[in-house]
Amino acid sequence: MNANLKRGRVEPAGSASSAPALGSILVASAEAVLAQRIARALSRRFALVEVAHSIAQAEKLRQRCAFDLLITATQLPDGSGLNWIESLRDQGVDAQVILLDDQADMDSAIAAVRAGASDYLVRPLHLARIESAVDRSFARRRHGNAANEATRPVLQQRPQELVVAHCEMVKSVCAVIKRVASTRATVLVLGESGTGKEVAARSLHAFSQRTGSFVPINCGAISPELLESELFGHAKGAFTGAHQARNGLFTYADGGTLFLDEIAEMPMAMQSKLLRVLDDQKIRPVGGNREVPVDVRVIAATNRDLAEAVRAGDFREDLYYRINVLTIRMPALRERREDVPVLAEHFVRTLADELSMPPVPITEEDIEALNTHDWPGNVRELRNVIERAVLLGISPAACLRELAQETRPEGSGAAVPEAVPGAPITLAAIEKRHIQAVLDGCGGNKSEAARKLEISRKTLDRKLQQWGRTAASPA
């Protein structure tokens, strides 16, 4: 057997400049279509990508190759993917692991972290999210295996959602990003959900020329008990199930950028610890007895009014002033309507290539429909509409009509009522109407509604409490 294959490394024929990156990946999933889609996408970039549909098949492949990364479903036909990973850890296998789950489950997420998984992804499993998780996993592996080697940034190109903009407001944002990117200043990115706050953060990192990785984390998606360990790491034996020491995201972002999304959802106790790290540039792993210096540029983001959160006692005033050194506001899509057709064309091209599907043409009817839509979900919603159109092979206008049908209240023959003609309609009213329609469509299941809206369950609960509404299901 080729020695390179045994080590999980394959040197492709041809020049080194055109060869895929060295790295071996095993994808284990009972869903053949999903596994092949992931494998096709990753094969363009990595030297060896194998697919297995059961634990038994995966083990046979592992006997031939020591894979760098394992991507596995939590449930496989012949057993639990999580139990399989735990058994591999007990055997001393140090491969990076990404777990794929059908739905967000806190017990599974906690078990995944304690088993040493580097990422835990739930549906919808977009290829872009999987590829980002793969990049983070290989970045972590490089940090662990070669501390003296500069880590290649995860971001390979400037985020195009900003580059393609025609809107003067977005051009101004780009100008600010280029001006401050090379500094170490902490940046606060504000904007509604889906406006591209992470895109702005990735742009700051890309223009900064920092040699470390861009590492994002959603502060509202991780339980308070796990957040400290996720950020700072933990020592062996720090808590039940901590069978080995584990680095946190600050360590993986050393020399690079840590993006704290939904920072307003961070628990108060963690806020004080984050403030100390920002001041001292040192972290203390959970259960550790010494501080570790880190070189991390922090970018924070939120869709909430932080000043109001400070007045309400939900956010520390000292941390607010510490992260609010420079503020970048991302405009809502309705404020940059001239960019809607341009972004739609961009998403058609990129998503057709990513999904290996033929692109759909955008007609004058489509442009009119896209321009007249309210876009409460902003750029994220536009991307999702185009992705659905590409997958189904229908026009964006038809896709919008189908989505409008889906979000009608159950048993209603009419769409959600529009505003009275001539009366002003506020953003809050649009947001409330959209969230309530999605929640009704999910039968009152708040967890399912939060997944569809791509917000945290905590954020959804807070909004419902503000409106004095309760859901039919406590889920």
Image (cartoon, rainbow, N blue to C red):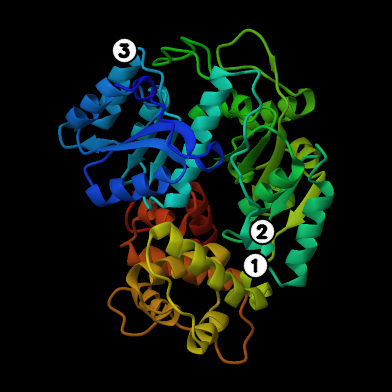
The N terminus lies in quadrant: top left
Question: Residue sitting at 45 percent across and 15 percent down?
Answer: 239
Q: Residue at x 54, y 87 (%)?
A: 368
Residue 151 image-quadrant placement? top right
The foreground one among 77 and 38 is: 38
Q: Residue furthest left?
A: 78
Q: Is 115 above or below relative to 315?
A: above
Residue contact at pointers 1 and 3, CB within 8 angstroms: no
Distance between mark 1 and mark 3 Cα atoms: 50 Å
- Evaluate if marks 3 and 2 touch, with contact meaning CB atoms under 8 Å apart: no
Q: Nearer the viewer, residue 420 or 89?
A: 89
Say which residue appears at 68% left-offset and 13% top-offset: 291
Q: Nearer the viewer, mark 3 or mark 2?
A: 3
Q: Amino acid at mark 2?
A: Gly
Q: Answer few, some or many: residues within 10 Å of disc 2's Cα (few below 14, many 20 plus, some between 14 and 19).
A: some
The type of residue carrying mark 1 is Ala
Q: Which mark is residue 205?
A: none
Q: Which residue matches tag 1?
A: 332
Q: Is residue 174 visible?
A: yes
Residue drawn 21% across the image and 25% down it: 60
Residue 306: x and y in percent read 71, 49
Q: Nearer the viewer, residue 338 or 113?
A: 338
Do tag 1 and tag 2 residues touch (Cβ < 8 Å)?
yes
Taking the image as shown, residue 320 lies to the left or right of residue 384, namely right
Q: From mark 3 to mark 2, how far is it between C-alphas?
A: 46 Å
Q: Residues within 10 Å of mark 1 (few under 14, many from 20)?
A: many
Instruction: Name which residue type carries label 3.
Output: Gln
Q: Residues within 10 Å of mark 3 (few under 14, many from 20)?
A: few
Mark 2 lies on a secondary structure that is loop
Disc number for residue 191: 2
- According to the picture, the residue beneath numbered tag 3 turns out to be 91
Mark whose residue sits in front, 1 or 3: 3
